[in-house]
Amino acid sequence: MPEVLLADFQIKRLEVLNEKGEADPELLPELSDAEMWRLYELMLLSRIFDERAVALQREGRIGTYPPIRGQEAAQVGSAFALTHKDWLFPSFREMGAHLTLGYPIPQLLQYWGGDERSQKVPPGLNIFPFCVAVGSQIPQAAGAALAARYRRDPVAVVTYFGDGATSKGDFHEAMNLAGVFHLPLVFICQNNQWAISIPLKGQTASASLAQKAIAYGFQGVQVDGNDVFAVYRATRQAVEKARSGAGPTFIECLTYRMADHTTADDAGRYRSGEEVTFWAARDPILRLERFLEGRGLWTPQKREETAAQAAAIVDAGVAEMEAAPPPAAAELFDEILATLTPRQAGQRKVR
Amino acid sequence: MAQLNMVQAINQALAQEMARDDRVLLLGEDVGRDGGVFRVTEGLLERFGRERVLDTPLCESGIMGAAIGMAAYGLRPVPEIQFLGFTYSAFEQLFAHAARLRSRSRGRYSCPMVVRTPYGGGIKAPELHEESTEALFCQVPGLKVVVPSGPYVAKGLLLAALRDPDPVLFLEPTRLYRLLREEVPEEEYLVELGKARVARSGSAVTVVAWGSMLERALKAVEGYDAEVLDLLTLNPFDSEAIVASVQKTGRLVIVHEAAKTCGFGAEIAATVAEEAILHLRAPIVRVTAPDVPVPLAKLIDHYLPGLQQIRSALDEVLQY
Ligand SMILES: Cc1ncc(C[n+]2csc(CCOP(=O)(O)OP(=O)(O)O)c2C)c(N)n1
Ligand SMILES: [Mg+2]
């Protein structure tokens, strides 16, 4: 008997902007100049927030912090496609997504400053708390997607995670659940090519992460994660698909972690300076600037103005974060249970 | 009033709560079409449909994680893990998330869900199907742990757990599923979480047990002037009831089928030492399994505490 071909798959990579900042007119998303400028402002705000957070850590004003430098397009571009009705299950390195959705800056900084009150997500934002246990937020997103569908809510549930997380069992279990139940779920993998010191090839022998989706019975796509328009376009399509009941999508944003893993890490121990330089030249903000310049929207002068505005916003956030009084000892017991156990109540009294 | 076994009582509680509250959904392996491997969820798929009774893929962590997302979204999921021994692969979801979601988000999100799972030994099942590691779960703040000891309390405790605003692990003693029948009222009633029950009153010694060991303890104390407390909830446990009973009897025997070291009996003994040591007329005795993995069927009777061991403990404290 001749062998039968069971599967023959293709996996695509989406790019809209090339490194010179030239856009493919067919693929350029329909965004007004004002919206494009907003993307730029948000990416710059993310960059400045990030630089400021690293500096605050160095000065001992906050604790360990995981920089997002280099991943601004992947985060801002994807979050820009969401509405406040959608649900977001982040990992811990998506501050650009938080900023895009309007998460209060003092609260974001407060988290890295070690204050739990920061995670009381403001009403109106369906964002889950940061998830430090790598990959474990992904099945939770599947559950929210099941609930959204049960409630007939036309919303998308979006979960973010890194390349390292794709090696975890929870990634597999959630991808499988999404396929089996045809969930309104968008998986956004920020493949920044490193999981602390482990490069992508130490994480998987798969030629791309996007192709993993095929085995679960749904679409996977790789996008140039340093191309904000490609990220936005793919996410926009995926969330619309989810909201309309057409099932899950996996988006691999191929990007690069330009900074150390965290402020406690020294990436020089495991990767070359040349590699970092190579990617620094592919900075997602530079690329968008070239594009906007070509449209007559950007000048070095405008960058300075925009950066100054962003710095003022971040400064105000830092000031507010630092003005917040520290939590009282009794706040250890806040919201542990709806009603404290008798023993907890007794322990609280003596704090 | 109908005489029901525990399987039927739990099934009735689930059905009643699902009829009353459309936020209640079941999910797990084989819970739908098959009605669960112990038939606890039998008939619920037919009655409530596939959206409320979800047969999931085989994925304990996925089930637990999905339940957390559902609960945060506003539903009241009831994930079933087929056997306690398989919750181990879902510990991260349960410990790192379900138990902490409320505090982590300072109350913005909560996790009202009831994780049901059969537990305990003596059913001639394969490895990991007879675990009784309940104490592991009691170490985690934010998670409640409930263990019924018979059909009547099973229904009332489950209804209370389903209405609790926080995550509850509901451990169903497998050996008791069909062993006991009791009168179970058709109408709904709640058995309050966190309260022990005096299963038998007495004045010379206090025996504390839960789950399948309650039945054994009650048999063992025949002929003794013993007070038997059925703990029902392990976290938060009713220390007041235990202390009050020990103040009266002056003697304490704790019976559990889990291994001794760091078993829940240690917590009870420490609490009594802190709060009632001067009332004790004899050392506290724990009757437990030895510190070895739960064996298969041929050795299980040498593992689980037996009537004779409980009686020896009673004699020991009474004759001290
Ligand atoms: C379950 C778990 N294991 C290990 C860690 C420690 N850790 C934190 S981040 C990280 C690497 C994560 O890599 P990736 O998923 O690619 O995300 P990235 O850090 O690149 O954003 C590790 C090992 C953790 N937080 N959780
Ligand atoms: Mg990574």
Image (cartoon, helix red, strand yellow):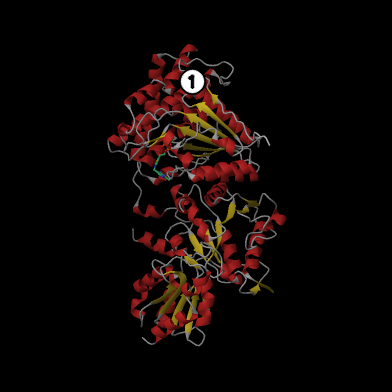
Q: Quadrant of residue A10?
A: top right
Give above or below for A217 relative to B173: above
From the viewer's perspective, is A124 left or right of A56? right
Q: Is residue B60 visible?
A: yes
Closest to the observer, A249 or A296? A249
Q: Determine the image quadrant of residue A45.
A: top left
Residue B98 at least partly seen: no
Residue highlighted by disc 1: A37
Q: Residue furthest front?
A: A1
Quarter in which the N terminus of chain A is drawn: top right
Instruction: Kindly tell me whether mark 1's CB lies below 8 Å from ligand 1.
Output: no
Image quadrant occupied by the C terminus of chain A: bottom left
Residue A189 at what x, y percent from top left?
Answer: 49, 34
- Left or right of B276, for residue B181: right
Determine the residue located farthest toward the left in the rendered image.
Answer: A59
Q: Residues within 10 Å of mark 1 (few under 14, many from 20)?
A: some
SS state under label 1 = helix
Tally of numbered discs: 1
In the image, residue B290 lies at what x, y percent?
Answer: 42, 71
Q: Is residue B47 above or below residue A238?
A: below
Q: Nearer the viewer, residue A57 or B220?
A: B220
Determine the residue positioned at 48% across, 67% down.
B295
Of A116 and B200, which appears nearest the observer?
A: B200
Residue A238 point in image, percent of width and height: 59, 32
* Position above or below: B189 against B49: below
Please report, as a chain letter, where disc 1 is located. A
Percent x, y of residue A275: 36, 25
The amino acid on which the numbered mark 1 sits, given as a three-letter code, is Trp
